Amino acid sequence: MLEKKTEYRYVNDLRRFAYTQRKLIEQKKTFIFLGLASIFLILVASLVEQYVSLGNEQTFILVAAAIIGGYMALNIGANDVANNMGPAVGGKVISVGAAVAIAAVCETSGALLAGGDVVNTVSKGIISPGNDISINSFRYLMLSALLAAALWINLATIFNSPVSTTHSIVGGILGAGLTVAGVTIVNWEMMAAIVASWVISPLFGGLISALLLYIIQSKILNVKNKKHAATTWLPILISLMAGAFTAYMALKGFKKVYKASSNEVYIYTFLSMVFAYFISKPYIISKLKYLENKKNDIYTLFHLPLLLGVSLLCFAHGANDVANAVGPLAAIVSTISSDADITSKVSIPIWVMMIGASGIALGLLLFGPKLIHTVGQKITRLNAPRAYCVALSSAITVLIATTLGLPVSSTHIAIGAIFGIGFLREIIENPSNKDKIKIKSKRKLVRRRFLYSIAAAWVITVPASAIMAGSIYYLFSISVF
């Protein structure tokens, strides 16, 4: 008996020691990651200071805006990009390292090729500054909005809450704008469109992801001859994805280089769909030779389409959400000139976009895995086909929004798509509701507490960031002006 008690105490001591060691390692990693993030911000400040040659106050404002923009980009990488990458990483299809590599290339490409219109919306579309606001006030307004949004997202990330960075920056600009000039400065028509997109985007993302999963389950996974069904349907799904990406690039991505007509867009889209179909079909047939007629084997066929979908999603995120980090910075940069005019169109230097794109990739690498785990595994259980549906539906929704120039939340879309997957699973996988006994045994495949907490965070984000931005601008006004 005494030996058992001694052994029990020894095991407990080992467990406590192991727990303490894990916590120490986590703390060391946190300090290292914070140090790397600080080095990134110092480099941003140094490069901007060397790049510009202005008066003392203008240099200070520009350097401060660049630092805060980089800080904002890090938080977007930790929070927003993690939401987009969560399904693929959580479904164990790609690693965090692969996710960072994809994000770095596609985020930068999306920002440089297709991010212009959304940057204009975020920086100048939410408020309508006129002659009654000085250039200096406008600069500090944008600086306040950017800092408030970054602080709020950082706080939410610490508490493992996937909030919307779009909500944060829009709320920040709104709050600072109201503090500067009251309700007359706000473009309420644009705000109404943005708010409507917040409601529509998660519902649209959820419906598209649920529809895609229903097609995959009914046409491929739940049929008797799964291999034959995959040969028939997977090339079609890949073809549709290729067509959607080609149409977007023809309409939006390359418009600065070549503006295609409607007929040309239709032709390019059709050709890409045909090309993708005939390329993907022999690939799938060759893979099926080594697979059995089992669901787990069929799942592996979705890995490559999922990677293509994630790449598409990253490109769309770069086009849409880099604006959250650099939109206010671009607005400030546009006022740094001898003939500055806050009502003029925002100029978007490449170095501004590079700050946002590189910051997002670094934020994902350093601080993203925690939220990736939450989004990818804790809301509902994901596998490769489900993750593919989430990624593709998110990409389609974001691309549509970017084409319209609306700064929708990729967080809302991705989370909405995941919930759409989970609720469809509850409908399909649970017994019929006609039997009362079966109703009692109905499984809840979506964790409701995450639904409620995420919805609450979405509601709080806009007023919280608005109040913070207004307070920061007030502090600026009494200390700087």
Image: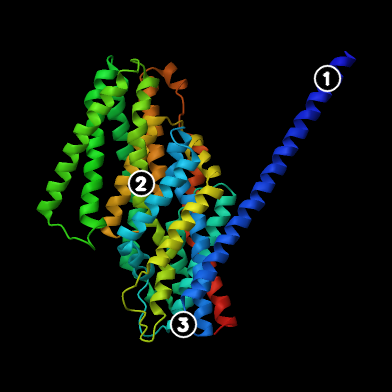
Q: Can residue 457 be seen in this view?
A: no
Q: Residues within 10 Å of mark 3 (few under 14, many from 20)?
A: some
Question: Looking at the picture, how far across and down is residue 341, in whole percent?
Answer: 35, 82
- Give the SS element for disc 1: helix
- Give the SS element for disc 3: helix
Q: Residue at x 63, y 57 (%)?
A: 35
Q: Which residue is drawn at 60% across and 61% down?
A: 38
Question: Looking at the picture, how far across and down is residue 136, in whole percent?
Answer: 46, 82
Q: Which residue is drawn at 72% across and 43% down?
A: 24
- Give the SS element for disc 2: helix
Is there CB contact under 8 Å for labels 1 and 2? no
Is there CB contact under 8 Å for labels 2 and 3? no
Q: Quadrant of residue 208?
A: top left
Q: From mark 2 to mark 3, how far is it between C-alphas?
A: 37 Å
Q: Mark 2 points at which residue?
A: 313
Q: Nearer the viewer, residue 170 or 436?
A: 170
Is there CB contact under 8 Å for labels 3 and 1? no
Q: Residue 7 carries which label?
A: 1
Question: Looking at the picture, how far across and down is residue 251, in whole percent?
Answer: 21, 55
Residue type, mark 3 in image: Asn
Residue type, mark 1 in image: Glu
Looking at the image, tell me whether mark 3 or mark 1 is earlier in sequence order: 1
**Placement of the C terminus among the 4 image quadrants:** bottom right
**Placement of the N terminus among the 4 image quadrants:** top right
Q: Name the residue under label 3.
A: 136
Q: Can residue 356 be seen in this view?
A: yes
Q: Residue at x 45, y 53 (%)?
A: 164
Q: Which of 312 and 451 is in front in this view?
A: 312
Is residue 412 shown above or below 44? above
Question: Looking at the picture, how far across and down is residue 296, in whole percent?
Answer: 40, 21
Q: How crowded is mark 1: few (under 14 residues within 10 Å), some or many (20 or more)?
A: few
Q: From mark 3 to mark 1, how far is it between C-alphas?
A: 71 Å
